[in-house]
């Protein structure tokens, strides 16, 4: 060691290089193992010393000759290991021997200690001296490096060899850069090779010697011609492809990373023909090979080291390892391949599209991705989805993704969701979440390219995901009301799928589809099972499914909502029966619970519906006005079904959210109606008529059937009961103060039904038997009294009110119902007082009567409203003369009842009746006459 260190510092030592090498070879050929190791170590340090010497470089460039001749006899006696060491040295330095093609055989030696020593030399050469190696020798060096990568003795050497291949590709790419730069210098071409030779000649002259460039020296320039460059690059790619199928995960993963990193880093320097060769000879073959090896590898779990025996059985060390089977490790390699392909598509997709038969390769890739998502592991499925998603996000914003590629990606998502996954439900849900994220990203990035057909396909894909998520909801999530992550993803993606301006016609389709997933009343699905089964078979085909899906929306306009929903849902497996459809012929209030045959799915639908309603309301309010009108009746009716579930499921949040949404969209519509002053010419009259019919149905069912009812005190806490009562009052306020007082386009019968619902709720207290009135909870009587108050408010008139046509019609309808209700209350009070005799009436009845008498005294109605009262014609004519002045003609209708209440036992009642009688006299113009009669009566006394 000491001698070598001093030896290489002597001047002129390069001239005796061959003698030194011969001496080292004697040591290497010695039978003593220690001598052989010493010789190899000396050779390695010698190479390291001479490679750093400029003098050795000059001698090498002058004397090195590679004629490709056969191996001479003196070389044939050398062992394969010695040839592997000496031949690279003879490539660089003066030698009389030629290159031996057996240089890589040392990598397969059986002696373990020889492999690292032999690899040291090639590593030094490939790391530091690539620029001085002749082109013909580079190919051999690459093969030698590949042989070391394939050897199974030392894993680290194989990994280092792969790294050397990456260094080689980087070196070759530098030649590409030089050639590219020269090709761009039109008229000013610089001969890099000549410059290099001139530099060498100048350095040689400084040492007093002259080196004349030869053809061999000229070929050693770093600038490679096209043929040599392509040959060397393909040599590296071939080795990497071979190593990509190595049984050792570390080696094959490193080789695959290196291959795709090379293509990604230097792909812009490759020619069109090279890219085609890379795709068809390296990229796709590697994909197929790794996929085949992954599918045929063992799934048996590996056991840890055996520690001993117990009871005659071996005891193994317990080691947790996520890659404890051969298949899992091959799947990891497959993930790397997909990741590499996605990087290529991200960087070079516009160029790749121009290659011949790229569409065939694209279909080949999509087929593999479909199978990987459906049948592969979760990691492979994620990588496959990411491959598509990366292509979309990187190329769509730049306009590099054409319509055909976009549709093919949608077809993949659709087909995958139609198939049943081969892995567990938890992993399947995560894969579907990734698909939905990819779908949302696809629409966001390429929304300007979408047409109605493509958007309908997105809705179909969304439907498949929702259907599976509802059918596979975990029982734990159902029991504790937990929203699964799949549902959260669905709600997130739905918000992204807002149709653009060019897709405005798809707003109703989006909203109608979402309405299908709200809980509905039980429908006779058993009557349609045969039809649904036939539709399932029809929709099994991909193209037929799209036609059926598109046709289902058309049926909304022709045969109603029910059949369209059934056709929409029936395109899949028997799980589709779990999602109930609305029965167009029946009343959803008849089965207000919305419970289907399967209790689990029903509860799941409730949980899903609770989160879906705010999304529907948000999308509906954001829709264009014209498209909003088309789906408005369906929205109202679906919310009404959810509101009606209160009676059978009062603890659910579903009906509360439906009430809030119902109020918000009605207030929004009434506000816009007053601002825009729409007419039947701008809005289809039939649609608006249907809308108000649905609104009246909802109020009939919810107000009369659910609100103001007695609920078991054990069902809900005091806080929840108070919140529910406030919500009921909000419903009344919206109806009585917002809707019925606004300028509407509602038909007369709908207005009449809305007022009738208030009257129906106001009659509850008076309709109860005298024995049970006192048992009525306070909130029930308060609700009934509030409804009565709304009737008074709607019938009243104030000079500051905006009196439009709708307000006039509502006032006329309200005064009619109000008079009937007041007459019933007054008469019922008289009957109860007579029946009880000396017993006092329930406080609730007395308070109700006092409130009615006070409100009657304050009530002033419009003369137009007074014209509908049951009075003599001459009285109506007299009232009509007070056209702009409020009247109290309603008191004349109730005058007989007032007269009977004069003798009531309640002093407050008698006093209020006297006030009312004076108002009657005033209304008839008899107030002065009454005063005179009172004076005469007083004088007589």
Image (tube, rainbow, N blue to C red):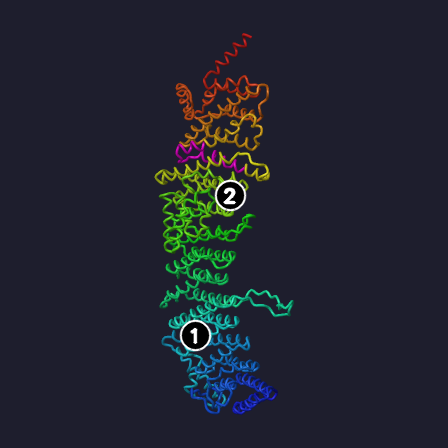
Q: Which of the pair 601/216 is nearer the observer? A: 601
Residue denoted by label 1: 177
Q: Which of the pair 204/137 is nearer the observer? A: 137
Task: Identify the element where label 1 is drawn.
Answer: helix
Give the mark nearer the N terminus: 1 vs 2: 1
Q: Indicate the quadrant containing the C terminus: top left, top right, bottom left or bottom right.
A: top right
Q: Is label 1 in contact with label 2 (beta carbons under 8 Å)?
A: no
Q: Which of the pair 220/564 is nearer the observer? A: 564
Q: How many marks?
A: 2
Task: Identify the element where label 2 is drawn.
Answer: helix
List x then y, in percent, for residue 615.
47, 47
Q: Quadrant of residue 686?
A: top left
Q: Indicate the quadrant containing the N terminus: top left, top right, bottom left or bottom right.
A: bottom right
733 inside magenta stretch: yes
53 inside magenta stretch: no
Overall secondary structure of the magenta section? helix
Above or below, 34 against 882 in this view is below
List x then y, in percent, for residue 786.
52, 31
Marks 1 and 2, how far apart in space? 66 Å
Q: Quadrant of residue 670?
A: top left
Are there few (<14), some (14-19), or many (20+) residues within 10 Å of tag 1?
A: some
Q: Which residues are magenta?
A: 726-755
Image disc number at residue 656: none
List x then y, in percent, for residue 502.
37, 51
List x then y, in percent, for residue 613.
48, 45
Are there few (<14), some (14-19), or many (20+) residues within 10 Å of tag 2?
A: many
Above or below, 5 against 456 in this view is below
Image disc number at residue 654: 2
Residue most extreme to the left: 681
Mark closer to the observer (1, 2): 2
């Amino acid at each position: 060691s000491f001698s070598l260190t001093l030896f290489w510092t002597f001047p002129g030592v390069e001239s005796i290089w061959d003698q030194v090498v011969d001496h080292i070879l004697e040591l290497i050929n010695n039978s003593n193992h220690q001598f052989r190791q010493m010789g190899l170590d000396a050779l390695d340090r010698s190479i390291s010393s001479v490679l750093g010497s400029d003098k050795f470089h000059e001698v090498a460039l002058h004397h090195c000759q590679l004629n490709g001749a056969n191996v001479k006899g003196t070389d044939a006696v050398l062992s394969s290991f010695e040839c592997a060491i000496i031949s690279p040295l003879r490539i660089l330095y003066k030698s009389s021997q030629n290159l031996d093609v057996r240089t890589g055989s040392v990598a397969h030696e059986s002696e373990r200690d020889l492999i690292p020593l032999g690899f040291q030399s090639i590593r030094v050469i490939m790391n530091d001296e690539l620029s001085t190696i002749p082109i013909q020798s580079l190919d051999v060096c690459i093969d030698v490096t590949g042989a070391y990568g394939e050897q199974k003795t030392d894993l680290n050497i194989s990994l280092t060899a792969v790294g050397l291949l990456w260094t080689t590709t980087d070196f070759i790419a530098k030649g590409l850069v030089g050639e590219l730069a020269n090709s761009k210098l039109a008229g000013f071409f610089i001969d890099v090779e000549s410059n290099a030779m001139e530099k060498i000649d100048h350095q040689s002259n400084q040492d007093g010697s002259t080196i004349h460039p030869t053809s061999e020296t000229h070929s050693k320039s770093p600038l490679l011609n096209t043929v040599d460059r392509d040959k060397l690059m393909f040599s590296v790619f071939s080795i990497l492809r071979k190593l990509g199928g190595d049984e050792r995960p570390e080696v094959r993963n490193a080789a695959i990373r290196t291959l795709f990193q090379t293509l990604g880093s230097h792909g812009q320097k490759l020619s069109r023909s090279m890219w085609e060769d890379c795709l068809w000879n390296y990229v796709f073959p590697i994909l197929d090979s790794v996929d085949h090896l992954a599918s045929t590898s063992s799934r048996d779990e590996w056991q840890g080291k055996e520690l001993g025996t117990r009871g005659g059985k071996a005891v193994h060390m317990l080691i947790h390892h996520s890659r404890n089977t051969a298949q899992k490790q091959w799947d990891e390699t497959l993930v790397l391949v997909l990741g590499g392909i996605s990087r290529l598509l991200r960087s070079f997709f516009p160029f790749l599209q121009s290659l011949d038969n790229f569409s065939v390769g694209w279909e080949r890739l999509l087929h593999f991705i479909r199978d990987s998502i459906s049948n592969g592991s979760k990691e492979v499925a994620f990588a496959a989805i990411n491959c598509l998603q990366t292509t979309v996000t990187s190329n769509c914003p730049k306009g590099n993704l054409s319509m055909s590629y976009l549709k093919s990606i949608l077809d993949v998502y659709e087909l995958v969701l139609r198939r049943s996954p081969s892995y567990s439900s938890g992993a399947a849900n995560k894969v579907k979440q990734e698909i939905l994220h990819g779908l949302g990203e696809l629409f966001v990035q390429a929304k300007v390219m979408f047409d109605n057909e493509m958007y309908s396909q997105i809705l179909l894909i969304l439907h498949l995901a929702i259907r599976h998520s509802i059918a596979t909801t975990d029982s734990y999530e159902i029991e504790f009301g937990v929203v699964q992550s799949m549902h959260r993803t669905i709600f997130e993606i739905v918000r992204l799928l807002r149709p653009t301006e060019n897709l405005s016609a798809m707003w109703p389709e989006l909203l109608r589809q979402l309405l299908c997933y709200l809980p509905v009343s039980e429908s006779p699905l058993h009557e349609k099972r045969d039809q649904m089964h036939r539709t399932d078979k029809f929709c099994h085909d991909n193209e037929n499914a799209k036609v059926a899906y598109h046709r289902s929306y058309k049926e909304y306009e022709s045969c109603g909502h029910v059949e369209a929903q059934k056709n929409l849902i029936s395109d899949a497996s028997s799980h589709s029966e779990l999602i109930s459809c609305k029965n167009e012929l029946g009343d959803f209030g008849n089965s207000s619970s919305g419970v289907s045959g399967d209790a689990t799915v029903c509860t799941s639908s409730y949980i899903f519906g609770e989160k879906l309603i705010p999304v529907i309301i948000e999308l509906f309010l954001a829709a264009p006005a014209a498209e909003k009108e088309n789906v408005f009746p369906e929205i109202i009716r679906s919310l009404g079904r959810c509101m009606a579930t209160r009676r059978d499921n009062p603890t659910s949040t579903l009906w509360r959210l439906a009430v809030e949404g119902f109020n918000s969209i009605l207030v929004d519509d009434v506000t816009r109606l007053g601002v825009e002053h729409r007419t039947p010419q701008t809005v289809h009259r039939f649609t608006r008529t249907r809308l108000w019919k649905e609104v009246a149905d909802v109020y009939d069912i919810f107000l009369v059937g659910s609100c103001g009812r007695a609920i078991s005190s054990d069902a809900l806490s005091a806080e929840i009961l108070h919140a529910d009562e406030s919500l009921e009052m909000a419903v009344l306020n919206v109806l009585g103060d917002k809707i019925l007082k606004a300028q509407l386009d509602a038909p007369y019968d709908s207005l009449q039904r809305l007022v009738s619902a208030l009257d129906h709720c106001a009659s509850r207290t008076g309709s109860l038997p005298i024995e049970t009135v006192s048992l009525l909870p306070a909130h029930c009587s308060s609700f009934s009294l509030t409804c009565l108050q709304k009737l008074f408010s709607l019938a009243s008139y104030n000079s500051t009110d905006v009196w439009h046509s709708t307000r006039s019609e509502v006032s006329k309808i309200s005064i009619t119902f109000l008079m009937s209700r007041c007459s019933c209350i007054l008469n019922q009070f008289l009957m109860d007082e007579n029946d009880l005799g000396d017993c006092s009436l329930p406080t609730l009845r007395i308070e109700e009567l006092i409130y009615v008498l006070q409100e009657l005294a304050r009530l002033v109605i419009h003369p137009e409203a007074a014209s509908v009262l049951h009075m003599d014609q001459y009285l109506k004519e007299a009232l009509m003369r007070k056209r702009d002045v409020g009247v109290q003609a309603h008191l004349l209708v109730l005058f007989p009842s007032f007269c009977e209440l004069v003798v009531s036992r309640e002093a407050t009642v008698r006093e209020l009746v006297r006030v009312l009688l004076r108002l009657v006299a005033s209304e008839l113009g008899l107030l002065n006459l009454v005063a005179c009669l009172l004076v005469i009566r007083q004088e007589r006394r």
